[in-house]
Image (cartoon, rainbow, N blue to C red):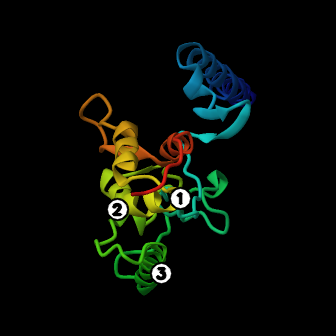
Amino acid sequence: MKTLIRPAVTLFILLSLITGLIYPLLVTGISQLLLPDQAAGSLIEREGKLIGSRLIGQNFTDPKYFWGRPSATGPYPYNAAASGGSNLGPLNPALKDVVAARVQALRNADPGNTQPAPVDLVTASGSGLDPHISPAAADYQVARVARARGLPPETVRDAVAQQTQGRQWGILGEVRVNVLELNLALDHLPLTKNP
C-alpha cells in the first residue's frame, strides 16, 4: 500500500505546484510583457483618476449619456463578482415583464422616439457585464443625448461613428460601440446651443 500512496502524493504535490503556481505565474508574466494594458484589466484613467474598464459596462442613467446593455448582476449593476445570465428563458413571463419595463424606461427618457427599441437595450447579455452596444442601439439614443447636451445630432452621430469598432480581425464578433469610451468622448466636446 505504501508503494502506491507515496507516488500518488508526490504526483499530487508536483501537479499542484505546476498547475496552481508555476503555470499561472508564467502566463501572467508573459501577458504583462506582451499585453500590459489588457493584463492590467484594460483600465481607463483620466487626470490620474480611475474611470472604469473597457471590458466591464457601467450603469449610466443620466439622459445626457448613452446607456449600455442592461446588467443582470443585481442588486448592483455590472458587478463582476455576480457575473452570469438572468436565466430567464424566452417563454418565461418574468422576462416579458422585465423587457417591458426596460422599454418603458427608454420611452420615458425620450417620449418623442417612436423607433422600436433595439434588443440589446432591453435584454441583458450572457455575462451581465457587456460594455458594448450595437450601432443601432447607439443611433436609437442619439436624439436624446444631443438634446440633453445641447449639441446638434450630427455632432453626436460623428462621436458615435468615431467610437464604433469593427469586427476583431475583420471576422470575429459584431460591429460595436464601447459605451464608456463614447460617453467620455462626449464629455470632452464643447457644449453648444442646439439649433
Residue farthest to the left? 171
Q: Is residue 4 visible?
A: yes
SS for tag 2?
A: helix
Q: Amino acid at mark 2?
A: Tyr
Query: Quick one: label 2, few (<14), some, or many (20+) residues within 10 Å?
Result: many
Disc 3 packing (10 Å; few <14; some 14–19; many ≥20)? few
Image x and y of residue 45, in percent: 66, 33
- Residue to which mark 3 is pinned: 101
Q: Left or right: 121 with respect to 17? A: left
Of tags 2 and 1, which is closer to the observer?
A: 1
Q: Secondary structure beneath disc 3?
A: helix
Image quarter (top left, top right, bottom left or bottom right) of the C terminus: bottom left
Q: Residue at x 35, y 42 (%)?
A: 158
> Residue 66: percent from the left, percent from the top?
48, 56
Q: Is residue 119 above or below residue 184?
A: below
Q: Of label 3 and label 2, which has the lower sequence position?
A: 3
N-terminal of the two: label 2 or label 1?
1
Q: Which mark is residue 64?
A: 1
* Whether residue 125 can be seen here: no
Which amino acid type is shown beneath numbered disc 1? Lys
Residue at image point 47% right, 44% down: 182
**Mark pair 3, 2: CA separation:** 17 Å
Q: For residue 113, what is the image quadrant?
A: bottom left
Which residue is at the front of the view, 143 or 50?
143
Q: Real-space Cα distance between discs 2 and 1? A: 13 Å
Q: Which residue is mark 2?
A: 140
What is the CA distance from the residue labelled 3 to the residue labelled 1? 21 Å
Give the residue displayed 34% in from the left and 66% down from the top: 119
> Which numbered mark, 3 or 2, is in the foreground of this view?
2
Mark 1: few/some/many CA within 10 Å (<14, 14-19, 20+)? some
Q: Nearer the viewer, mark 3 or mark 1?
A: 1
